[in-house]
Amino acid sequence: MKKLLLSLCLGIGLVWAGAALAQSAEPPKDAPAAAETAAPTPAPAATEPAAAEPAAAAAAAVTVDKGDVAWMMTATLLVVLMVLPGLALFYGGLVRSKNMLSVLMQVMMVFSLITVLWAIYGYSLAFGGEGAIIGSLDKVFLAGVTTASLADTFTENVKLPELIFVAFQATFAGITCALIVGSFAERIKFSAVLLFSALWFTFSYLPIAHMVWGPGGYLLDKGALDFAGGTVVHINAAMAGLVGAYLLGKRIGYGREAMPPHSLTLTMVGASLLWVGWFGFNAGSNLESTAGAALAFLNTLLATAAAVLAWSIGEALHKGKASMLGAASGAVAGLVAITPACGSVGPMGSIVIGLVAGFVCLWGVTGLKKMLGADDSLDVFGVHGVGGIVGALLTGVFAAPGLGGTGAEDFSIASQLWVQAEGVVITMVWSSVVAFIAYKIVDMVIGLRVTEEEEREGLDITYHGESAYNR
């Protein structure tokens, strides 16, 4: 544990050193995800009375709607519900009973750790400053974030309290890191999970989040469409998980012994909670309680339902039976795929995206998984990686106004697809490289994998001294 704490301190120190070299910039003005401090404007000189009138009019035009604030607080709570207990139960039901608590603990601790790091420096590096790749340290320790500071929305002069924007984005960072847990479940040291999460969050999540959503971000300026995190959250996490699955190696007995989920009941409950919480994830990304949020809400409902149907149909055609595990996995695949598109496509487009994601992700956890040869324990790449790629690319198609999307009249599918593909490739490469280095650092400092004896006994007892089920 001492080594873990020292390593965390080292990682944070590296962030400070790297960010100090980043370009400092003016507070964001137009980016809907950017925050600005509402400091009082100095009074103009007495000889310039005319200048006071436009300034006063602009200040008066800024509004903070109580309905928007209430919606964003609700949306933030829904995203927390996605993680705890949603994701935890979804993952926990999929592992063997001897590892149930270890997965629950990893999800809960990773989410908690990242939430704290987000407040200390994550928010500043993601949304403070206008660098192309990373922000600045202007808002480290939430400096300047007060009850008076405001964050932009997608509507000019409509603002949110910056405090709720910080909280909402913290949940995104937390769930992204928690998603990775599913790739190396049942065989990784608890301390290794925490140290890796801190390193990867710092050097992969924050730069990608800034590039896609932050003011001056490279992909944002390129025009990449990612409404709620197809690249930032799902592809980003999936690549880190796939690299981890390769580096940790396969579980003992994998491919020779049966390793069925110990409780599909809990997995179904977890998937259902994910679906409910995802409305906050997607519709909340609109940042206002408007028709835009309603569009994202409806698209999230439709795409998910379509993906459940597609996965189950594909499974029935392939295996002769549709399973509960397949239906739950299909729901998550649909949720993942519609995430980048939910605010940019029409309802019919969302159904098509869900159908495609259901069929393609089914192949992702069967045919593609065999081709890759990695023991991705809970199919993080097959669902989140493949689904994220499908959703990101199809966003560039169905955002076209001729297909019911919200794109401008001069929208070009070919041009947008190119930008979307660039975002996908950058995210895949960046996350993979950072993850590989982070895993190697963790392995050198504290080691990655548990001993064979610990793995056979189960991580619940060996690492937490308790069992999920007492008989």
Image (cartoon, rainbow, N blue to C red):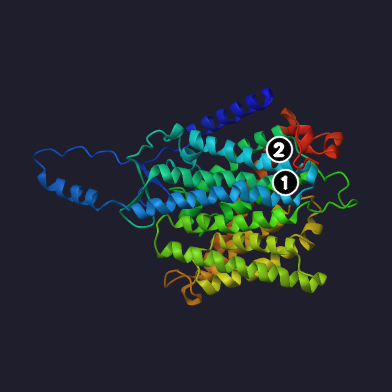
Residue 94 is at least partly visible in this image: yes
Q: Amino acid at mark 1?
A: Val
Residue furthest top as drawn: 2
Residue 237: image location, x then y, percent: 64, 49
The foreground one among 413 and 290 is: 290
Residue 405 percent location from the top left of the image? 48, 71
Residue drawn at point x = 68 percent, y = 63 percent = 330
Describe residue 43's horizontal placement relative to residue 255 as left or right: left
Residue tagged 2 = 439
Residue that appears at 15% across and 49% down: 53
In the image, is residue 14 above or below residue 241?
above
Q: Quadrant of residue 333?
A: bottom right
Q: Position of residue 448 (x, y in %)?
A: 75, 35
For residue 220, above or below residue 121: below
Going by the picture, which residue comes out furthest to the front? 471
- Identify residue for label 1: 243
Q: Is residue 144 left or right of residue 430?
A: left
**The disc labelled 2 sits on which kind of residue?**
Tyr
Residue 96 image offset from top left, x and y in percent: 79, 47
In the image, what residue occupies the spot 81% across and 41% down?
A: 471
Q: Residue at x 58, y 51 (%)?
A: 82
Q: Are marks 2 and 1 in contact (CB under 8 Å)?
A: yes
User: Label 2: few (<14), some or many (≥20) within 10 Å?
Assistant: many
Q: Classify mark 2: helix, strand or loop.
A: helix
Element type where label 1 sits in the image: helix
Foreground: 450 or 221? 450
369 relative position to 430: left or right: right
Q: What is the quadrant of residue 320 in the picture? A: bottom right
